[in-house]
Amino acid sequence: MFTNNKGGVGKTTSAFNIAKMFAKHGYKTVIVDLDPQCNISRLALGENFIQNNLFSNDNIFTVLEKLISGTGDINKEVNFLDISENLSILQGSLKLSNFERMLSTGFNEAAAGQTRGFVITSAIDRFLRFKGLNENVDLYIIDTNPSLSQLNKAIFLATDYFLVPNTPDVFNVQGVENLGSFFEEEKRNWNLTSAVLAKTNDEISPSHVLKGDSIFVGYILNSYNVSSKKPVSSQQKWIDILPQEIKEKLSLKQSKNGLVELSWSKPIGFIQDYGQLSTLSQESGKAIFEISESDASAIGTIENLEKSKEEFESIYVELLERISKW
């Protein structure tokens, strides 16, 4: 799960490029677009997004449609859309916000021990786990909306791991505090009330109860500007402050074992501002590191292209090590 309640931190760009890197290394990877703005679907599918969104039934809303209308449960027949070798996507939908409203009621009902509340809150998790087992998915990369929403709460309580992309500024330092407080409260409330009540109701299947045990694996530092191959001084201040805030608000509360110190003391990786390469990536639907040398050279960013290959490869190695160990 890629999450940050602040927008403009490179969350979607990071998720897309890291998904591409895992697929490149042979892992069957599925991008899951759980942002009603559908930014990662637009990025991954390009000009095909509008056509797919209008005419295809293979999207997150179709998974939930019968549940939302009260006529059934999740639709397990919805397919992932292939993007490239080893990479697919569960396409987003602008209608996903309809489920957001339902989730609020669902969490209240779950807190009262009612079966329906657990059916609602576990819907996305149940679909992804079913498809994961049946299609041999190695990894889900989940992109979320920039908010402290009921939808993000449901994803957080279901996911195995989460990471937080950040940019070096005062607003991200404040955002980490907000995010940490939100996750701490919601995990505690779920595990002390709903999860306990579920065990007293024989009608509630264990698969309908979110595990509420996600692990914080670390943060990515995004969009920093460089001068003499180092972050500019105005950003270095926040780069130095951010780890302590992450330690107190996320690592000590949401990490485990050796990840507690590692998750705050060492970023998963650094992603600098690649300038026009990012624009070219969005226009082409390619990962930044997949852009051809001729295209990069044409806009004078060949050095940035080489840097992107190094940075995303390094992030892949570090992230894989963290989720493999814990």
Image (cartoon, rainbow, N blue to C red):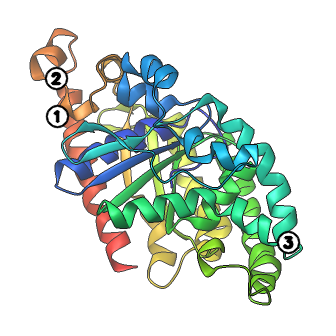
Q: Residue at x 79, y 77 (%)?
A: 194
Mark 1 residue type = Glu
If you read the primary sequence from the N terminus, does the residue marked by circle 2 or circle 3 appear first?
Answer: 3
Tag 2: amino acid = Ile
Is 253 or 36 nearer to us in this picture? 36
> Does residue 300 lie above or below 65 as drawn?
above
Does residue 104 appear left or right of residue 304 in this picture? Answer: right
Q: Where residue 259 sits: x, y (%)? A: 46, 76
Res. 95 image quadrant: top right
Q: Are marks 1 and 2 in contact (CB under 8 Å)?
A: yes
SS category of the residue bearing label 1: helix
| First-in-chain label (3 vs 1) | 3
Q: CA distance from mark 2 to mark 3?
A: 54 Å
Element under label 3? helix
- On the image, numbered disc 2 is attached to which residue? 302
Residue type marked 3: Ala
Q: Tag on residue 306?
A: 1
Q: Distance of mark 3 from mark 1, alpha carbons? A: 51 Å
What residue sits 79% from the left and 85% below the top? 201
SS at circle 2: helix
On screen, residue 108 above or below 141:
below
Across and down, in percent, residue 296 comes to 18, 18
